């Protein structure tokens, strides 16, 4: 079974006329390419450009695709040092277009899909070297992450945005259940990984912060000329949690092989030649900004991040097989399942 996920423009117009009249006349609605989670559309109206982001149709895993939580945190972060689009309207009535959705401002700029930022060698750099541009982008991401984790949830109305304590224990339980619910093939590495993580959970150190949950390069928008970070996107996995989860998740992605399909990382890439910091330097810069000396149990955080990504990809593949994935290429991600679990097992045995 397949689903038409594009909302009916006439139905949406009638709803917006009564609930969001400032949008004016709706002229067009076009789905953005890329992305595997909540479908997003560029909404052109008589008053400007906006983004509509909805849940996918069909049967959804429990707690997945929480666009209401995503809207809430974007709205909460409007006046902070963390760049986000402007939150405009949330609709929790599934009857309007078949699922919950929200509307936010459209932020123009560049989204980079390749962690090596190799396209800077082919584009104008306005007086700066390609390496300095790449270094600036990674520095901007690092600063944004430190700024996010420095925000006190109660100061932005997010004091009840997540449960306190035992973050990794709860997250491991959640992603284990989601992986098992979406599993489409047997994997000895995945079984080993889940067992190892359960046996090596670090003690709860009491650290808690607003975490993005999917902090990576292709969820950010940069200005084309100066490479300033102007918006962080895709907050559906955000919660109150452990700040090291965000940092390790980004570093995990950078460990992925450079030729790994839809999610190319920096594995096998000589970063110094590109002006990109090493993982050790990137973590050290974050620690300096966070006011800490170092991070213990780094292997656990990295291995957990691999498992989390594995669970997310497995969910995308399952939705593809069920016919309700937001991206028509969802089934192509099935080829990543075994490599991801193997990389996770390898991470357990290696130091960065």
Image (spheres, helix red, strand yellow):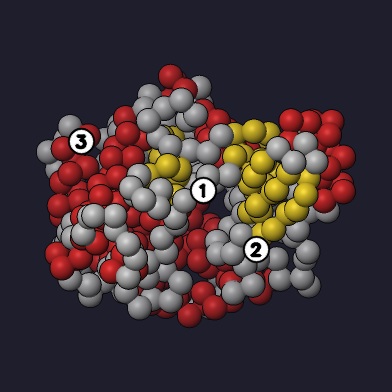
Residue 251 lies in quadrant: bottom left
Q: Earlier in the sequence, mark 1 or mark 2?
A: 1
Residue marked by disc 1: 108
Would you say 108 lies left or right of 275 here? Answer: right
Image quarter hosting the N terminus: bottom right
The part of the image, by quadrant, that contains residue 36 is bottom right
For disc 2, the neighbor class at 10 Å (few under 14, some 14 to 19, many from 20) is many
> Compared to 89, does 326 lie above or below?
below
Asked whether residue 246 is in view, the answer is: no
Is 188 situated above or below 90?
Answer: below
Across and down, in percent, residue 72 comes to 57, 33
Mark in front: 3 vs 1 = 1
Q: Earlier in the sequence, mark 3 or mark 2?
A: 3
**Residue reaching furthest front?**
127
**Residue sitting at x 75%, y 58%:** 6
207 or 221, which lies in front?
221
Q: Position of residue 223 (x, y in %)?
A: 40, 48
Q: Of helix, strand and loop, which one carries label 2?
A: loop
Q: What residue would you read off at disc 3? A: 289
Question: Which residue position holds label 2?
Answer: 326
Q: Quadrant of residue 170?
A: top left
Residue at image coords 15%, 52%: 281
Counting residues from the start of the chain, the first of labels 3 and 1 encountered is: 1
Q: Is residue 267 visible?
A: yes
330 relative position to 143: left or right = right
In this view, the residue in front, 141 or 202, is 141
Mark 1 vs mark 2: give the one in front: 1
Q: Count residues near mark 3 (Cα–Cα under 10 Å), then give few for <14, some for 14-19, many for 20+.
A: some
Which percent across, then down, holds residue 133?
26, 55
Residue found at x 59% / y 64%: 33
Judge from the rendering whether residue 300 lies leftward or rightward of residue 5; answer left or right.
left
Q: Residues within 10 Å of mark 1 (few under 14, many from 20)?
A: few
């Amino acid at each position: 079974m397949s689903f038409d996920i594009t909302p009916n423009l006439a139905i949406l117009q009638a709803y917006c006329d009564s609930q969001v009249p400032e949008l004016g006349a709706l002229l067009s609605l076009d789905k953005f390419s890329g992305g595997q989670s909540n479908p997003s559309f560029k909404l052109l109206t008589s008053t400007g450009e906006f983004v509509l982001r909805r849940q996918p149709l069909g049967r959804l895993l429990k707690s997945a695709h929480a666009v209401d939580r995503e809207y809430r945190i974007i709205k909460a972060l409007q006046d902070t040092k963390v760049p986000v689009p402007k939150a405009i309207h949330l609709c929790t009535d599934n009857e309007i277009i078949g699922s919950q959705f929200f509307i936010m401002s459209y932020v123009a700029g560049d989204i980079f899909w390749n962690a090596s930022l190799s396209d800077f060698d082919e584009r104008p750099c306005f007086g700066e070297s390609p390496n300095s541009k790449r270094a600036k982008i990674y520095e901007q991401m690092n600063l944004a992450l430190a700024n996010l984790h420095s925000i006190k949830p109660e100061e932005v109305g997010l004091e009840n945005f997540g449960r306190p304590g035992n973050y990794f224990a709860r997250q491991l339980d959640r992603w284990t259940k989601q992986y098992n619910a979406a599993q489409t093939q047997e994997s000895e590495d995945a079984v080993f990984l889940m067992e190892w993580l359960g046996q090596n959970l670090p003690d709860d150190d009491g650290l808690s912060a607003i975490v993005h949950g999917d902090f990576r390069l292709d969820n950010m928008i940069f200005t084309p000329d100066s490479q300033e970070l102007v918006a962080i996107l895709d907050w559906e996995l955000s919660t109150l949690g452990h700040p090291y989860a965000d940092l390790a998740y980004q570093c995990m992605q950078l460990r992925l092989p450079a030729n790994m399909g839809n999610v190319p990382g920096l594995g096998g890439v000589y970063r110094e030649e590109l002006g990109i910091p090493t993982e050790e330097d990137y973590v050290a810069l974050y620690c300096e900004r966070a006011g800490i000396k170092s991070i213990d149990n780094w292997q656990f955080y990295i291995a957990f991040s691999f498992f989390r990504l594995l669970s997310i990809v497995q969910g995308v593949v399952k939705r593809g097989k069920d016919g309700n994935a937001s991206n028509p290429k969802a089934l192509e991600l099935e080829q990543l399942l075994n490599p991801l679990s193997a990389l996770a097992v390898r991470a357990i045995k290696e130091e960065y």
